[in-house]
Image: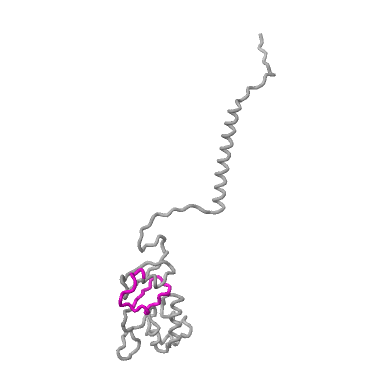
Amino acid sequence: MATVLDTDSPAPRLDPRRRLGVGAVIVLVLLGFAVTVGIGIFRGATGTETVTTAPTSTGDVSPLPGAGVYVHVAGAVREAGLYRLAVGDRVADAIARAGGFADDAARDGVNLARTVTDGEQIVVPVVGAVPPAVGGGEGATSGPLDLNTATREQLDALPRIGPALADRILAWRDENGRFTSVDDLGSVPGIGEKMLASLRDLVRV
């Protein structure tokens, strides 16, 4: 006897709660995928990323290589030595790092407002110290004058250098940093080749 299938009977239906659970899972998966893709697009567009740096020790060492300058502070300060300062720091900052002026310091002998440069030496004179004279006069001290530590009076004492030209030399030093060569004097307004030649043996850097 053949079995007759009832094709008109309805197909079994899923429990409504089960269908709701499956739909929620699908929505969550699609949402997570969309969030991941969105983050990837944002990072690609901005080019930003999170960078962590290792902790650094305190002291004179800067956290980033090349981020500072080294200066040698000497003379009438409390703690002379080599110090590392930030780019853009001034002579006042260097002297502060060296413990400040000593009791016998000639405070007017240095320009506190000048920006320091890498590798320079800052010498604070002592009160009453006789600056090295230039020339062959009686009691003169032999040796060329250091352009990077010379005062206005010392520059004024050089042959053919008057007060106005001495001020220009100091102004050039304030604006450009230390002299790296005697030839840099040629960049000072008013100093030509002939004057530079006459000063070459009288000054140094």
Residue at screen point 32% across, 91% down: 137
Residue 137, compared with residue 8, is above or below; it is below
Quarter of the image containing the N terminus? top right
Residue 190 drawn at (x, y percent): 48, 85
Query: Picture coordinates of residue 126 (x, y %)?
Result: 31, 79
Q: Extreme front residue here?
A: 103
In the figure, is residue 53 to the left or right of 102? right
Identified at 59% across, 31% down, the residue is 20
Front-most of 76 and 57? 76
Q: Which x, y percent locates residue 16? A: 61, 27
Q: 145 left or right of 36?
A: left
In the image, the segment drawn in magenta is: 96-124
Compared with residue 170, is residue 56 higher up or lower down, i.e. above or below? above
Residue 200 horizontal/vertical position (percent): 39, 84
Residue at 37 percent across and 85 percent down: it is 202
Membership of 21 in magenta stretch: no
The residue sitting at the bottom extreme is: 138
Q: In which quarter of the image is residue 105?
A: bottom left
Q: Nearer the viewer, residue 5 or 169?
A: 169
Q: Residue at x 38, y 57 (%)?
A: 56
